[in-house]
Image (spheres, rainbow, N blue to C red):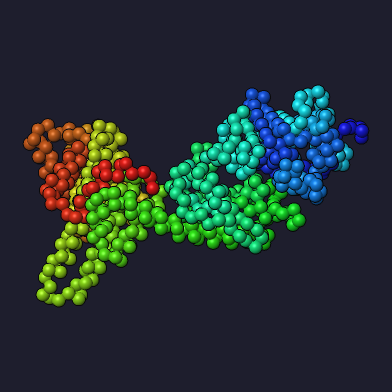
């Protein structure tokens, strides 16, 4: 390449690598730099067309364009600082330029192997191509000088503006046009007809609404003049305005914007998986910091509901030092102006937190008392307990859960609250006079009411477990399903066993009883016990599960479980503990020798002599259902607390929106 080439760029490989090829990580970030350049060129329209078919992106604006001299002096000069020229710091349209470091154009090389530039100004047209591999080669050969390849100027088919074509993309075009619109909309606050700066992606205009988070907000706090606050709130159609504070006045300048909270934390993850739980910082209409929340250590639950946009142009003043990082995505943290902004934001977030908690508490009460029984219960409380209950309602309402889960939590809340109240009542017994029978009866009646309600809930939950198991009744997989449930819900075998201790599942005898290994036979060592536990009465229980379709006879079954019994007895004797060993065999089919009622009874007697009993899967569930069902049938009296719990399982909350 000769020195009389029309275009010339000078840079080192180190600059190319660190400020070009490795500085930006995604297509939206790079295109943001191109759009910012178009804004600085007084463009009123920018059109981006992504073409997955030929792996290219075209960005064209109707801005001022560049002469050939300006291409070299500005576009191809790395580090060109436009703001040093007082005539360039503000555009003819009165825009305060976004660009400052003069390295944004290098970002193009981070996503494309080839970059073509077409520009036209005042009748002068220029066209050139930059190739990453050629840049590397020429810099190595010439010590830092690169001569872009001229392109036929007749390809410039417009009179004013600039067109940039990115070819052979490195990052690919995984982002759809709609996703790109969304990400660009979140990076600029000056797009739209009101700013005389319109942006299009594949022909569709990018608008503020493309940010796609205003509809997610529940409460909004604004920091802006009245007219701007009205515009912000108009976008948040589902939100409630809680405070219009006006701009924040700091020593370094003004802060405007808004902070909002979503209806639940899950609403702050959009359809593309982007996390919106952020406070974006905008400077001169462009994203300057992707998330101010990460600079503030706050792990409170309310912080997971937060989103906001803060504008602070005083962070980018021409006369002062540039405090943006090279990638223009963050601010240098140590700068006093940034620390002042963070201090202001922390103060505002404290106000938001207190206000949010109060609003959620009020809303929690409103949701809870839609059930008239809870409303009656709530209204029956005295002042102090009522305030505590209101706070608890608010806490439930803060949980990022749906209505069904919320109803269940309300039920547990009432139970927990009543338990605490009755504990307080029982403490009153120390001061009760012997003759105050009425007060004593009231306390014990309330305790009985609570206990009945609790057990009623337990029974209903157990019946739901039984129903789930019955749905698997005809499956051979029932053995494994039931094994897990029996291990965790021993009441299925016998209600009196639910407080069993020392539980074991799927244990190999040789390993579990290693202390008596020399006393065990090989068959005993290699056997495997399905479930073993110790009852509170001292009995040791072994549960043997058979596949649903397996049929065995009494003799074979007894021989098999004898291995477990003998091994366990040896272990018990060696450990110097007492307690009999019981064995429960759960089968799907009748034993093969149960050919008659008499034969079945004889088998039962023989097995019982060794504390072995056989129960069938369907009988096990049938007996459990009958036992607990009978309790529900008999429990005709409905206490105050039980009435509330029962009401929470009906449809009284079905139409309540997520709070």
Judge from the rendering whether residue 344 lies leftward or rightward of residue 331; answer left or right: left
Name the residue furthest front.
227
Q: Residue 298: x, y in percent?
A: 51, 58
**Which residue appears at 13% of the width and 50% of the height?**
635
Q: Residue at x 51, y 43 (%)?
A: 235
Task: Determine whether 242 is above or below 53 in the image.
Answer: below
Asked whether 410 or 155 is in front, the reply is 155
The answer to whether residue 186 shows anywhere in this view is yes
Image spot of residue 65 (x, y percent): 77, 34
Among all residues in the image, which is located at the extreme left? 598
Relative vertical location of residue 539 with respect to residue 615 in this rendering, above or below: below
Count every numbered label the image shows and give the total: 0
Vertical side of 357 occupied by 621: above or below: above
Q: Tell me what residue is drawn at x 67 percent, y 34 percent.
A: 45
Which quarter of the figure has residue 111? Answer: top right
Q: Is residue 529 left or right of residue 199?
A: left
At which x and y percent is residue 188?
62, 43
Q: Residue at x 19, y 72 (%)?
A: 429
Where residue 252 sits in the image (x, y, percent)? Answer: 66, 60
Q: Evaluate whether residue 614 shows in this view.
A: no
Q: Quadrant of the N terminus?
A: top right
Q: Residue 526 or 33: which is nearer the viewer? A: 33
């Amino acid at each position: 390449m000769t020195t009389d080439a029309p275009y010339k760029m000078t840079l080192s490989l180190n600059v190319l690598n660190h400020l070009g090829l490795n500085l930006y990580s995604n297509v939206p970030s790079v295109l943001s730099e191109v759009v910012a350049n178009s804004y600085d060129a007084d463009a009123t329209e920018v059109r981006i067309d992504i073409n997955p078919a030929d792996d290219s992106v075209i960005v064209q604006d109707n801005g001022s364009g560049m002469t050939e001299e300006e291409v070299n002096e500005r576009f191809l000069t790395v580090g060109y600082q436009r703001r040093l020229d007082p005539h360039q710091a503000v555009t003819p349209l009165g825009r305060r330029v976004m660009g400052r470091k003069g390295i944004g154009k290098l970002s193009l090389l981070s996503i494309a192997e080839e970059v073509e530039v077409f520009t036209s100004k005042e009748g002068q047209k220029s066209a050139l191509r930059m190739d990453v591999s050629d840049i590397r080669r020429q810099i190595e050969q010439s010590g830092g000088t690169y001569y872009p390849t001229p392109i036929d100027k007749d390809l410039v088919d417009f009179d004013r503006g600039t067109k940039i074509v990115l070819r052979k993309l490195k990052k690919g075009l995984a982002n759809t046009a709609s996703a790109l619109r969304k990400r660009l909309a979140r990076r600029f606050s000056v797009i739209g007809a009101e700013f005389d700066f319109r942006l299009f992606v594949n022909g569709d205009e990018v608008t503020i609404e493309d940010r796609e988070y205003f509809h997610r907000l529940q409460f909004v706090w604004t920091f802006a003049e009245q007219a701007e606050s009205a515009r912000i709130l108009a976008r948040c159609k589902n939100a409630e305005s809680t405070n219009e504070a006006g701009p924040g006045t700091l020593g370094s300048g003004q802060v405007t914007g808004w902070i909002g909270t979503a209806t639940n934390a899950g609403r702050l993850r959009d359809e593309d998986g982007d996390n919106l739980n952020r406070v974006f910082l905008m400077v001169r209409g462009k994203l300057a910091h992707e998330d101010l929340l990460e600079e503030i250590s706050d792990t409170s639950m309310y912080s997971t509901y937060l989103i906001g946009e803060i504008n602070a142009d005083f962070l980018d003043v021409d006369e002062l030092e540039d405090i943006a990082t090279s990638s223009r995505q963050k601010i240098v943290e140590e700068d006093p102006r940034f620390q002042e902004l963070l201090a202001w934001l922390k103060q505002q977030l404290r106000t938001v937190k207190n206000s949010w908690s109060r609003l959620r508490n009020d809303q929690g009460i409103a949701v809870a008392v839609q059930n008239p029984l809870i409303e009656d219960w709530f209204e029956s409380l005295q002042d102090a307990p009522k305030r505590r209950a209101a706070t608890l309602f608010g806490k439930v309402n803060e949980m990022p859960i749906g209505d069904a889960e919320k109803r269940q939590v309300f039920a547990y809340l009432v139970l927990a609250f009543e338990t605490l109240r009755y504990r307080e009542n029982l403490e009153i017994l120390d001061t009760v006079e012997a003759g105050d029978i009425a007060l004593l009866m009231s306390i014990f009646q309330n305790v009985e009411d609570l206990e009945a309600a609790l057990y009623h809930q337990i029974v209903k939950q157990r019946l739901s477990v039984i129903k789930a198991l019955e749905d698997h009744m005809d499956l051979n997989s029932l053995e494994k399903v039931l094994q897990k449930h029996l291990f965790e819900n021993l009441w299925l075998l016998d209600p009196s066993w639910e407080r069993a201790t020392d539980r074991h599942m799927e244990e190999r005898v040789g390993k579990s009883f290693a202390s008596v290994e020399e006393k065990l036979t090989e068959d005993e060592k290699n056997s495997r016990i399905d479930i073993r536990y110790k009852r509170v009465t001292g009995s040791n229980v072994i549960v043997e599960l058979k596949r649903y379709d397996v049929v065995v006879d009494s003799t074979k079954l007894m021989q098999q479980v004898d291995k477990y019994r003998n091994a366990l007895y040896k272990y018990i004797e060696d450990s110097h503990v007492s307690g009999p060993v019981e064995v429960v065999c759960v089968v799907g089919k009748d034993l093969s020798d149960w050919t008659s009622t008499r034969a079945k009874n004889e088998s039962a007697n023989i097995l019982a002599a060794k504390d072995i009993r056989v129960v069938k899967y369907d009988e096990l569930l049938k007996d459990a259902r009958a036992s607990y069902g009978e309790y529900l049938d008999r429990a005709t009296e409905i206490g105050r607390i039980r009435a509330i719990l029962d009401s929470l399982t009906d449809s009284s909350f079905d139409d309540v929106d997520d709070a």
